[in-house]
Image (cartoon, rainbow, N blue to C red):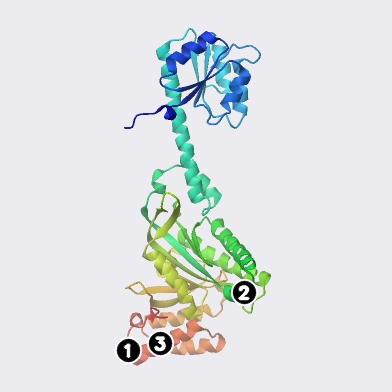
Amino acid sequence: MPQETPADRAKVLLVDDESSNLEFLCALLQHEYNITVAKSGAQALARAAADPPPDVIVLDILMPEMDGYEVCRRLKADERTRDIPVIFVTALDGEADEEKGFALGAVDYASKPFRPAVVRARIASHVRLRRTQRELELEQRRIRTLFGRFVDPKLVDSLLRTPDESILLARHEQVSVLFADIEGFTSLSEHRTPAELFSILGRILTELTEEILALEGTLDKYIGDAILAFWGAPMAQPDHARRAVQAAFRMSRRAAELGLTLGGGPKPIGLRIGIATGPVAVGGVGSQLRCDYTVIGDTVNLASRLESANRYFHTRVLVSDRTRAEAGEGLAMRTIGPVRVAGREGIERIHEVLIESDSASYPWLSRYESAYRSLEMADSQAAIQQLAGLIVDYDDRVIRALLDRALRMRDHHAPLVDHYYDLVTK
Protein backbone atom coordinates (compact mmCIF):
# COMPACT_ATOMS: atom_id res chain seq x y z
CA MET A 1 0.00 0.00 0.00
CA PRO A 2 1.54 3.40 -0.96
CA GLN A 3 2.65 5.61 1.91
CA GLU A 4 0.59 8.74 2.47
CA THR A 5 2.41 11.95 1.56
CA PRO A 6 1.91 15.28 3.40
CA ALA A 7 -0.22 16.50 0.49
CA ASP A 8 -2.54 13.50 0.93
CA ARG A 9 -3.08 14.05 4.64
CA ALA A 10 -6.43 15.14 5.96
CA LYS A 11 -6.77 18.81 6.84
CA VAL A 12 -7.75 19.68 10.43
CA LEU A 13 -8.82 23.18 11.47
CA LEU A 14 -8.09 23.94 15.16
CA VAL A 15 -10.09 26.82 16.67
CA ASP A 16 -9.20 28.17 20.13
CA ASP A 17 -8.45 31.60 21.55
CA GLU A 18 -5.84 30.13 23.93
CA SER A 19 -2.39 29.81 22.35
CA SER A 20 -1.36 27.10 24.82
CA ASN A 21 -4.25 24.87 23.72
CA LEU A 22 -3.40 25.39 20.05
CA GLU A 23 0.27 24.60 20.68
CA PHE A 24 -0.65 21.39 22.50
CA LEU A 25 -3.02 20.21 19.77
CA CYS A 26 -0.59 21.13 16.97
CA ALA A 27 2.20 19.16 18.61
CA LEU A 28 -0.16 16.20 19.09
CA LEU A 29 -1.55 16.12 15.55
CA GLN A 30 1.00 17.70 13.19
CA HIS A 31 2.65 14.41 12.21
CA GLU A 32 -0.66 12.91 11.05
CA TYR A 33 -2.59 15.85 9.59
CA ASN A 34 -2.18 19.14 7.80
CA ILE A 35 -3.03 21.66 10.49
CA THR A 36 -4.66 25.08 10.11
CA VAL A 37 -5.38 27.26 13.16
CA ALA A 38 -7.82 30.04 13.95
CA LYS A 39 -7.88 32.13 17.16
CA SER A 40 -11.37 33.58 16.77
CA GLY A 41 -14.79 32.69 15.44
CA ALA A 42 -14.45 35.05 12.47
CA GLN A 43 -11.11 33.49 11.46
CA ALA A 44 -12.62 30.02 11.83
CA LEU A 45 -15.51 30.81 9.48
CA ALA A 46 -13.18 32.25 6.83
CA ARG A 47 -10.74 29.32 6.97
CA ALA A 48 -13.50 26.73 7.00
CA ALA A 49 -14.76 28.16 3.69
CA ALA A 50 -11.29 27.98 2.09
CA ASP A 51 -10.47 25.67 -0.80
CA PRO A 52 -9.78 22.90 -0.01
CA PRO A 53 -11.97 22.91 3.09
CA PRO A 54 -10.90 21.15 6.27
CA ASP A 55 -11.88 17.53 6.80
CA VAL A 56 -12.58 18.12 10.51
CA ILE A 57 -12.96 21.21 12.68
CA VAL A 58 -11.88 21.03 16.34
CA LEU A 59 -13.74 23.93 17.95
CA ASP A 60 -13.45 25.47 21.40
CA ILE A 61 -16.73 26.62 22.93
CA LEU A 62 -15.66 29.36 25.34
CA MET A 63 -14.27 32.13 23.15
CA PRO A 64 -14.78 35.91 23.30
CA GLU A 65 -16.88 37.85 20.75
CA MET A 66 -18.26 34.70 19.07
CA ASP A 67 -18.47 31.48 21.07
CA GLY A 68 -18.18 28.00 19.61
CA TYR A 69 -21.94 27.46 19.56
CA GLU A 70 -22.45 30.49 17.31
CA VAL A 71 -19.54 29.45 15.08
CA CYS A 72 -21.08 26.00 14.70
CA ARG A 73 -24.50 27.47 13.92
CA ARG A 74 -23.02 29.62 11.15
CA LEU A 75 -20.98 26.74 9.76
CA LYS A 76 -24.10 24.59 9.45
CA ALA A 77 -26.04 27.44 7.84
CA ASP A 78 -23.45 27.83 5.05
CA GLU A 79 -23.76 25.38 2.16
CA ARG A 80 -19.98 25.42 1.70
CA THR A 81 -19.24 24.27 5.27
CA ARG A 82 -22.36 22.52 6.56
CA ASP A 83 -21.02 19.00 5.93
CA ILE A 84 -17.68 19.48 7.74
CA PRO A 85 -17.66 17.48 11.01
CA VAL A 86 -17.30 19.68 14.12
CA ILE A 87 -15.77 18.30 17.33
CA PHE A 88 -16.28 20.57 20.34
CA VAL A 89 -13.52 20.87 22.93
CA THR A 90 -14.59 22.31 26.25
CA ALA A 91 -14.22 22.30 29.99
CA LEU A 92 -18.02 22.32 30.27
CA ASP A 93 -19.26 18.89 31.23
CA GLY A 94 -22.99 19.30 31.75
CA GLU A 95 -25.49 17.25 29.76
CA ALA A 96 -27.30 20.41 28.72
CA ASP A 97 -24.08 21.75 27.17
CA GLU A 98 -23.58 18.56 25.17
CA GLU A 99 -27.21 18.47 24.05
CA LYS A 100 -26.92 22.07 22.84
CA GLY A 101 -23.81 21.26 20.82
CA PHE A 102 -25.32 18.16 19.21
CA ALA A 103 -28.51 20.08 18.42
CA LEU A 104 -26.40 22.62 16.51
CA GLY A 105 -24.79 19.87 14.43
CA ALA A 106 -21.61 18.88 16.29
CA VAL A 107 -20.58 15.25 15.85
CA ASP A 108 -18.48 14.72 19.01
CA TYR A 109 -16.99 16.20 22.17
CA ALA A 110 -13.46 16.21 23.63
CA SER A 111 -13.13 17.37 27.22
CA LYS A 112 -10.48 19.58 28.77
CA PRO A 113 -7.98 18.83 30.13
CA PHE A 114 -7.06 16.94 26.98
CA ARG A 115 -6.42 13.21 26.98
CA PRO A 116 -4.12 12.75 23.96
CA ALA A 117 -5.20 9.21 23.05
CA VAL A 118 -8.90 10.16 23.17
CA VAL A 119 -8.40 13.31 21.09
CA ARG A 120 -6.42 11.46 18.43
CA ALA A 121 -8.90 8.57 18.27
CA ARG A 122 -11.92 10.84 17.89
CA ILE A 123 -10.33 12.98 15.20
CA ALA A 124 -9.14 9.89 13.30
CA SER A 125 -12.62 8.38 13.43
CA HIS A 126 -14.31 11.46 12.00
CA VAL A 127 -11.62 11.94 9.34
CA ARG A 128 -12.36 8.40 8.12
CA LEU A 129 -16.09 9.09 8.12
CA ARG A 130 -15.60 12.36 6.25
CA ARG A 131 -13.44 10.70 3.59
CA THR A 132 -16.02 7.95 3.17
CA GLN A 133 -18.71 10.61 2.77
CA ARG A 134 -16.63 12.36 0.09
CA GLU A 135 -16.10 9.09 -1.77
CA LEU A 136 -19.87 8.55 -1.78
CA GLU A 137 -20.40 12.09 -3.05
CA LEU A 138 -17.87 11.50 -5.84
CA GLU A 139 -19.63 8.26 -6.77
CA GLN A 140 -22.97 10.06 -6.86
CA ARG A 141 -21.51 12.73 -9.12
CA ARG A 142 -20.10 10.00 -11.36
CA ILE A 143 -23.53 8.37 -11.59
CA ARG A 144 -25.17 11.72 -12.38
CA THR A 145 -22.53 12.42 -15.05
CA LEU A 146 -22.91 8.96 -16.59
CA PHE A 147 -26.70 8.77 -16.53
CA GLY A 148 -27.86 12.38 -16.29
CA ARG A 149 -27.74 12.99 -20.06
CA PHE A 150 -29.54 9.78 -20.93
CA VAL A 151 -32.01 8.96 -18.15
CA ASP A 152 -35.00 10.73 -16.63
CA PRO A 153 -33.82 12.73 -13.57
CA LYS A 154 -36.30 10.84 -11.37
CA LEU A 155 -34.58 7.58 -12.31
CA VAL A 156 -31.15 9.03 -11.49
CA ASP A 157 -32.47 10.07 -8.07
CA SER A 158 -33.75 6.53 -7.56
CA LEU A 159 -30.32 5.13 -8.42
CA LEU A 160 -28.73 7.42 -5.86
CA ARG A 161 -31.26 6.50 -3.15
CA THR A 162 -30.59 2.79 -3.62
CA PRO A 163 -26.87 2.62 -4.46
CA ASP A 164 -25.71 -0.62 -6.02
CA GLU A 165 -22.18 -0.82 -7.37
CA SER A 166 -23.18 -3.56 -9.83
CA ILE A 167 -25.38 -1.08 -11.71
CA LEU A 168 -22.27 0.45 -13.28
CA LEU A 169 -20.60 -2.87 -14.06
CA ALA A 170 -20.98 -4.68 -17.36
CA ARG A 171 -23.57 -7.45 -17.06
CA HIS A 172 -26.25 -9.32 -18.98
CA GLU A 173 -29.84 -8.07 -18.79
CA GLN A 174 -33.16 -8.69 -20.50
CA VAL A 175 -34.22 -5.38 -22.08
CA SER A 176 -36.28 -3.89 -24.89
CA VAL A 177 -34.28 -1.89 -27.43
CA LEU A 178 -35.80 0.84 -29.61
CA PHE A 179 -34.10 2.10 -32.76
CA ALA A 180 -35.74 5.10 -34.45
CA ASP A 181 -34.75 6.89 -37.64
CA ILE A 182 -36.23 10.17 -38.86
CA GLU A 183 -37.89 9.83 -42.26
CA GLY A 184 -38.21 12.92 -44.42
CA PHE A 185 -35.39 14.82 -42.74
CA THR A 186 -33.24 14.83 -45.88
CA SER A 187 -35.88 16.62 -47.93
CA LEU A 188 -36.60 18.95 -45.03
CA SER A 189 -32.92 19.92 -44.86
CA GLU A 190 -32.64 20.94 -48.50
CA HIS A 191 -31.95 24.62 -49.14
CA ARG A 192 -31.22 25.28 -45.46
CA THR A 193 -28.04 26.60 -43.87
CA PRO A 194 -26.05 24.33 -41.52
CA ALA A 195 -27.20 26.45 -38.57
CA GLU A 196 -30.86 26.03 -39.56
CA LEU A 197 -30.35 22.33 -40.17
CA PHE A 198 -28.82 21.68 -36.76
CA SER A 199 -31.46 23.80 -35.07
CA ILE A 200 -34.25 21.75 -36.66
CA LEU A 201 -32.56 18.44 -35.89
CA GLY A 202 -31.94 19.52 -32.31
CA ARG A 203 -35.59 20.36 -31.82
CA ILE A 204 -36.78 17.06 -33.31
CA LEU A 205 -34.38 14.96 -31.23
CA THR A 206 -35.20 16.90 -28.07
CA GLU A 207 -38.93 16.36 -28.40
CA LEU A 208 -38.59 12.68 -29.28
CA THR A 209 -36.21 12.15 -26.37
CA GLU A 210 -38.77 13.71 -24.02
CA GLU A 211 -41.17 10.90 -24.93
CA ILE A 212 -38.50 8.28 -24.17
CA LEU A 213 -37.66 9.80 -20.80
CA ALA A 214 -41.34 10.24 -19.93
CA LEU A 215 -41.61 6.44 -19.98
CA GLU A 216 -38.36 6.11 -17.98
CA GLY A 217 -36.33 4.85 -20.90
CA THR A 218 -32.56 5.16 -21.17
CA LEU A 219 -31.21 7.16 -24.09
CA ASP A 220 -28.21 5.26 -25.41
CA LYS A 221 -27.05 7.57 -28.18
CA TYR A 222 -27.89 9.72 -31.17
CA ILE A 223 -26.56 8.43 -34.49
CA GLY A 224 -26.95 11.31 -36.91
CA ASP A 225 -30.73 11.68 -37.16
CA ALA A 226 -31.37 8.29 -35.49
CA ILE A 227 -32.01 7.44 -31.83
CA LEU A 228 -31.07 4.32 -29.86
CA ALA A 229 -32.85 3.83 -26.52
CA PHE A 230 -33.73 0.93 -24.22
CA TRP A 231 -35.82 -0.09 -21.22
CA GLY A 232 -34.96 -2.56 -18.45
CA ALA A 233 -31.63 -1.08 -17.31
CA PRO A 234 -30.03 0.40 -15.29
CA MET A 235 -33.11 -0.16 -13.09
CA ALA A 236 -35.24 -3.27 -13.53
CA GLN A 237 -38.55 -2.65 -15.34
CA PRO A 238 -40.71 -5.78 -15.61
CA ASP A 239 -42.90 -4.02 -18.20
CA HIS A 240 -39.98 -2.83 -20.36
CA ALA A 241 -41.49 -4.22 -23.59
CA ARG A 242 -44.78 -2.39 -23.07
CA ARG A 243 -42.97 0.85 -22.23
CA ALA A 244 -40.96 0.61 -25.46
CA VAL A 245 -44.11 0.07 -27.56
CA GLN A 246 -45.89 2.93 -25.80
CA ALA A 247 -42.87 5.12 -26.53
CA ALA A 248 -43.19 4.20 -30.22
CA PHE A 249 -46.83 5.37 -30.18
CA ARG A 250 -45.93 8.65 -28.54
CA MET A 251 -42.83 9.32 -30.63
CA SER A 252 -44.73 8.67 -33.87
CA ARG A 253 -47.45 11.12 -32.91
CA ARG A 254 -44.94 13.74 -31.82
CA ALA A 255 -43.05 13.35 -35.10
CA ALA A 256 -46.27 13.87 -37.05
CA GLU A 257 -47.01 17.02 -35.05
CA LEU A 258 -43.49 18.29 -35.67
CA GLY A 259 -43.88 17.70 -39.39
CA LEU A 260 -46.91 19.95 -39.45
CA THR A 261 -45.22 22.58 -37.30
CA LEU A 262 -41.88 22.72 -39.10
CA GLY A 263 -43.20 22.30 -42.64
CA GLY A 264 -40.96 23.39 -45.48
CA GLY A 265 -40.59 20.01 -47.15
CA PRO A 266 -42.46 18.01 -49.76
CA LYS A 267 -42.91 15.10 -47.31
CA PRO A 268 -43.98 15.26 -43.66
CA ILE A 269 -41.55 14.18 -40.97
CA GLY A 270 -42.15 10.60 -39.91
CA LEU A 271 -40.36 7.90 -37.97
CA ARG A 272 -39.30 4.37 -38.74
CA ILE A 273 -38.98 2.42 -35.50
CA GLY A 274 -37.75 -1.08 -34.71
CA ILE A 275 -38.13 -2.67 -31.27
CA ALA A 276 -36.59 -5.95 -30.10
CA THR A 277 -36.70 -7.63 -26.69
CA GLY A 278 -34.03 -9.99 -25.43
CA PRO A 279 -30.63 -10.36 -23.79
CA VAL A 280 -27.92 -7.71 -24.08
CA ALA A 281 -24.63 -6.83 -22.47
CA VAL A 282 -25.13 -3.52 -20.68
CA GLY A 283 -22.69 -1.26 -18.84
CA GLY A 284 -20.30 1.64 -19.05
CA VAL A 285 -18.10 1.49 -22.16
CA GLY A 286 -15.32 3.88 -23.05
CA SER A 287 -12.08 5.31 -21.78
CA GLN A 288 -10.94 7.43 -18.85
CA LEU A 289 -11.78 10.50 -20.94
CA ARG A 290 -15.35 9.47 -21.77
CA CYS A 291 -17.65 6.67 -20.72
CA ASP A 292 -21.11 5.90 -22.12
CA TYR A 293 -23.75 3.62 -20.66
CA THR A 294 -24.75 1.40 -23.57
CA VAL A 295 -26.18 -1.93 -24.73
CA ILE A 296 -24.44 -4.42 -27.01
CA GLY A 297 -25.66 -7.64 -28.58
CA ASP A 298 -27.91 -9.40 -31.08
CA THR A 299 -31.05 -7.75 -29.68
CA VAL A 300 -29.62 -4.34 -30.62
CA ASN A 301 -28.84 -5.59 -34.13
CA LEU A 302 -32.38 -6.96 -34.50
CA ALA A 303 -33.95 -3.65 -33.45
CA SER A 304 -31.84 -1.86 -36.06
CA ARG A 305 -32.80 -4.38 -38.78
CA LEU A 306 -36.48 -4.07 -37.93
CA GLU A 307 -36.24 -0.31 -38.28
CA SER A 308 -34.79 -0.83 -41.77
CA ALA A 309 -37.46 -3.43 -42.62
CA ASN A 310 -40.08 -0.70 -42.41
CA ARG A 311 -38.82 0.50 -45.80
CA TYR A 312 -39.73 -2.82 -47.40
CA PHE A 313 -43.18 -3.16 -45.81
CA HIS A 314 -44.02 0.57 -45.96
CA THR A 315 -44.72 0.44 -42.23
CA ARG A 316 -43.80 2.74 -39.36
CA VAL A 317 -43.13 0.51 -36.35
CA LEU A 318 -42.02 -3.14 -36.38
CA VAL A 319 -41.40 -5.26 -33.28
CA SER A 320 -39.98 -8.70 -32.58
CA ASP A 321 -42.14 -11.66 -31.61
CA ARG A 322 -40.93 -11.52 -28.01
CA THR A 323 -41.68 -7.81 -27.78
CA ARG A 324 -45.27 -8.43 -28.82
CA ALA A 325 -45.63 -11.33 -26.39
CA GLU A 326 -44.30 -9.30 -23.45
CA ALA A 327 -46.01 -6.00 -24.30
CA GLY A 328 -49.36 -7.33 -23.11
CA GLU A 329 -52.91 -6.84 -24.29
CA GLY A 330 -54.75 -3.79 -25.56
CA LEU A 331 -52.19 -2.64 -28.13
CA ALA A 332 -53.07 -2.49 -31.82
CA MET A 333 -50.71 -4.78 -33.76
CA ARG A 334 -50.82 -7.11 -36.74
CA THR A 335 -48.58 -10.06 -37.44
CA ILE A 336 -46.46 -9.75 -40.57
CA GLY A 337 -44.79 -13.15 -40.32
CA PRO A 338 -41.36 -14.76 -40.37
CA VAL A 339 -38.45 -12.78 -41.79
CA ARG A 340 -34.72 -13.24 -42.19
CA VAL A 341 -32.58 -10.16 -41.68
CA ALA A 342 -28.90 -9.40 -42.22
CA GLY A 343 -26.56 -10.46 -39.45
CA ARG A 344 -28.83 -13.20 -38.04
CA GLU A 345 -28.99 -16.86 -38.96
CA GLY A 346 -32.44 -17.61 -37.57
CA ILE A 347 -35.93 -16.64 -38.66
CA GLU A 348 -37.81 -14.02 -36.61
CA ARG A 349 -41.57 -13.56 -36.63
CA ILE A 350 -42.32 -9.85 -36.60
CA HIS A 351 -45.34 -7.64 -36.01
CA GLU A 352 -46.43 -4.16 -36.98
CA VAL A 353 -47.45 -1.69 -34.30
CA LEU A 354 -50.37 0.33 -35.63
CA ILE A 355 -49.97 3.96 -34.67
CA GLU A 356 -53.45 4.40 -33.22
CA SER A 357 -53.35 2.77 -29.80
CA ASP A 358 -56.52 0.63 -29.98
CA SER A 359 -57.74 -1.98 -32.44
CA ALA A 360 -61.11 -0.24 -32.88
CA SER A 361 -59.36 2.33 -35.08
CA TYR A 362 -58.69 -0.45 -37.62
CA PRO A 363 -61.97 -2.14 -38.64
CA TRP A 364 -60.13 -4.31 -41.19
CA LEU A 365 -57.68 -5.73 -38.62
CA SER A 366 -59.79 -8.72 -37.57
CA ARG A 367 -60.16 -9.78 -41.23
CA TYR A 368 -56.40 -9.57 -41.71
CA GLU A 369 -55.68 -11.65 -38.60
CA SER A 370 -58.25 -14.23 -39.73
CA ALA A 371 -56.44 -14.56 -43.06
CA TYR A 372 -53.10 -14.93 -41.28
CA ARG A 373 -54.49 -17.70 -39.06
CA SER A 374 -55.70 -19.49 -42.18
CA LEU A 375 -52.13 -19.46 -43.50
CA GLU A 376 -50.80 -20.77 -40.19
CA MET A 377 -53.25 -23.69 -40.52
CA ALA A 378 -51.98 -24.27 -44.08
CA ASP A 379 -55.34 -23.28 -45.57
CA SER A 380 -53.87 -21.13 -48.30
CA GLN A 381 -57.03 -21.10 -50.39
CA ALA A 382 -59.11 -19.59 -47.57
CA ALA A 383 -56.37 -17.02 -46.92
CA ILE A 384 -56.30 -16.05 -50.60
CA GLN A 385 -60.04 -15.46 -50.65
CA GLN A 386 -59.94 -13.42 -47.42
CA LEU A 387 -57.00 -11.28 -48.52
CA ALA A 388 -58.40 -10.69 -52.00
CA GLY A 389 -61.60 -9.39 -50.43
CA LEU A 390 -59.67 -7.27 -47.94
CA ILE A 391 -57.62 -5.57 -50.66
CA VAL A 392 -60.81 -4.18 -52.17
CA ASP A 393 -61.54 -2.26 -48.94
CA TYR A 394 -58.02 -1.66 -47.64
CA ASP A 395 -54.93 -2.02 -49.77
CA ASP A 396 -51.39 -1.78 -48.45
CA ARG A 397 -47.97 -3.37 -48.92
CA VAL A 398 -48.31 -5.78 -45.98
CA ILE A 399 -51.60 -7.25 -47.25
CA ARG A 400 -50.21 -7.63 -50.76
CA ALA A 401 -47.05 -9.30 -49.41
CA LEU A 402 -49.14 -11.75 -47.39
CA LEU A 403 -51.31 -12.50 -50.42
CA ASP A 404 -48.17 -13.22 -52.44
CA ARG A 405 -47.02 -15.68 -49.76
CA ALA A 406 -50.44 -17.36 -49.76
CA LEU A 407 -50.22 -17.84 -53.52
CA ARG A 408 -46.72 -19.31 -53.23
CA MET A 409 -47.86 -21.63 -50.45
CA ARG A 410 -50.70 -22.87 -52.62
CA ASP A 411 -48.46 -23.39 -55.63
CA HIS A 412 -45.58 -25.05 -53.75
CA HIS A 413 -47.54 -26.86 -51.02
CA ALA A 414 -45.10 -25.62 -48.35
CA PRO A 415 -45.86 -24.49 -44.79
CA LEU A 416 -45.87 -20.82 -43.82
CA VAL A 417 -42.48 -20.94 -42.09
CA ASP A 418 -40.82 -21.95 -45.38
CA HIS A 419 -42.11 -18.78 -47.03
CA TYR A 420 -40.35 -16.20 -44.88
CA TYR A 421 -39.52 -12.72 -46.12
CA ASP A 422 -35.83 -12.59 -47.02
CA LEU A 423 -34.73 -9.07 -46.09
CA VAL A 424 -30.99 -9.73 -46.08
CA THR A 425 -30.56 -7.84 -49.33
CA LYS A 426 -33.58 -5.54 -49.08
Q: As drawn, which residue projects farthest toward the bottom?
A: 411
Is residue 328 at least partly visible in the picture? no
User: Eyeballing the image, is 65 above or below 46?
Assistant: above
Query: Residue drawn 55% across and 31% down?
Result: 51
**Residue 131, located in which quarter of the rendered image?**
top left
Q: Position of residue 369 (x, y in %)?
A: 46, 78
Proximity of marks 2 and 3: CB atoms separated by less than 8 Å: no
- In the rendered structure, the answer to whether residue 105 lies left or right of residue 282 reads right
Q: Position of residue 425 (x, y in %)?
A: 39, 80
From the image, tell me which residue sits under label 1.
Answer: 413
Local SS, label 2: helix
Q: Position of residue 209 (x, y in %)?
A: 56, 60
Total label count? 3
**Residue 59, located in which quarter of the rendered image?**
top right
**Callout 3, which amino acid?**
Ala
From the image, tell me which residue sits under label 2.
Answer: 188
Question: Whole-Å distance between the Cαs marked 2 and 3?
Answer: 39 Å
Query: Residue drawn 60% across and 63% down?
Result: 202
Query: Residue drawn 45% across and 50% down?
Result: 289
Local SS, label 1: loop
**Residue 68, located in which quarter of the rendered image?**
top right
Local SS, label 3: helix
Which is nearer the N-term, disc 3 or disc 1? 3
- In the rendered structure, the answer to whether residue 67 lies left or right of residue 309 reads right
Mark 1: few/some/many CA within 10 Å (<14, 14-19, 20+): few
Question: Whole-Å distance between the Cαs marked 1 and 2?
Answer: 47 Å
